[in-house]
Image: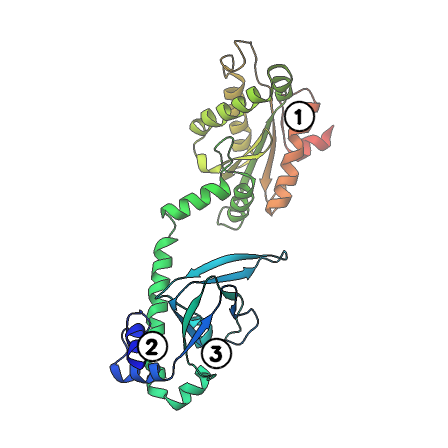
Amino acid sequence: MVSETKRLLKSTPLFSSCPDEDLNEIAALSGEIKMKNGETVFDAGDAAERLYLVRSGEVVIRKDDGEGSGVDIARFLPGDYFGELDMFTGQIRNARATASSETSLLCFPGDGRRFSELSELTPAASARLFHSFLIQISARIRGINALVKENSPLVRELKRQVYVDKLTGLFNKTCFEETLARCLDGSHEHIGLLMYKPDNFKEINDTAGHEAGDKVLRFISDVLSDFVPDRDMLFRYMGNENALILPGADRADLVRRAQEIGDFLRDLDLSPILGNRDFSLSVSFGLALSPDHGSDAAALVEAAHPLTLEGRRRGGNRRLFPEDAEAE
């Protein structure tokens, strides 16, 4: 039994570098657990006294999702081991391990012993085993770092899922708020915020339908992405309102950029989308400058966002700073 256990231990990355004398000692101190389908190996809140290696069967790790149910976070098959991190660090288990079939587990240490007790009885073997564990953890960290580096396909896809608006392809409100906050914490003395909204977009939805309205939004986003110098600073804020962050801009820069974008949007030919109907967008802008109109992201948005509606209320095609709204 000890020789078969030693062979099994030797086949795992954690124990493969251990010398024969250590493997003999670890095998002798290990035990076997037979579990039926649905039986619990350990539960959240249990002391982490040993690690487990799956001889046969399958073990599922499930964690409470905070809403009264659980989510499977890992699945271990024959040859896999689990529970070693908590055992080495002395942490309390934070998830439940359950056999999902007839399962045989090798546990180390066995017979009710604790790893903390064994480390005192076999200090040399325990130290070498802990060193092997550190090597495995370092390898995992390197693998994770490679997986989640800034430009990895995984990270790019995660960013797309989290930060890109599905309708327009622009960065979304979440990305806008995080980017604006990051810019305000940066080195620029001034941050300009330009928010704009078509005054007469409701007319498109009312006369051509919401599907046509969505097509217009996608078209505007596509062409405007090519028109603005820095596409990464253009965002869909909500509905048909967009935002453009201008690091380092002053008041004159904001006015000039609003004029350029307004002229560009008003000249767009939307007739192919609207059934050859002659239609010209009317666009109003809310302009705000940090620190003049707010030194944090929420204050700056609060200063600029209502002005797009105020511009429409005043007849449309307006470019307003907060003080312009107060002047009426």
Task: Check disc 2: other Cα within 10 Å, few if <14, some if 14-19, many if 20+.
Answer: some
Residue at point 60% right, 37% down? Answer: 288
Mark 1 Cα shell of 10 Å, populated few (<14), some (14-19), many (≥20): many
Residue 28 locus on image (x, y percent):
35, 84
- Foreground mark, 2 or 3, reads 3
What numbered label is drawn on residue 190?
Answer: none
Residue 294 visible in image: no
Q: Residue at x 32, y 77 (%)?
A: 5
Front residue of 317/322: it is: 317
Distance from label 1 to label 3 (Cα)?
A: 67 Å
Foreground tag (2 vs 1): 2
Query: Could you say where residue 305 lies in the image, as x and y percent from the top left?
Result: 64, 35
For the view shown, which residue lies furthest in the bottom direction? 121
64 vs 131: above or below:
above
What amino acid is at disc 1? Answer: Gly
Gap in angstroms between the C-alphas marked 2 and 1: 67 Å
The mark nearer the N terminus, 2 or 3, is 3
Q: Circle 1 sits in a helix, a strand or a loop, which is it? A: helix
Give the residue pinned by disc 1. Answer: 311
The residue carrying mark 2 is 131
* Residue 234 visible in the snapshot: yes
- 34, above or below 115, in the image: above
Contact, mark 2 vs mark 1 (Cβ under 8 Å) = no
Quarter of the image with the C terminus in it = top right
Q: Is residue 17 left or right of residue 236?
A: left
Amino acid type of the residue that numbered disc 3 sits on in the rendered structure:
Glu
Q: Which kind of residue does numbered mark 2 sit on?
A: His
Residue 127: give x, y in percent of width and height.
Answer: 35, 82
- Of the numbered discs in the image, which one, if any, rests on residue 49? 3
- Decide which of tag 2 and tag 1 comes sooner along the chain: 2
Give the class, few, some or many, for how many residues have Cα within 10 Å of label 3's Cα (few <14, many ≥20). Answer: many
Q: Colour scheme used in the picture?
A: rainbow
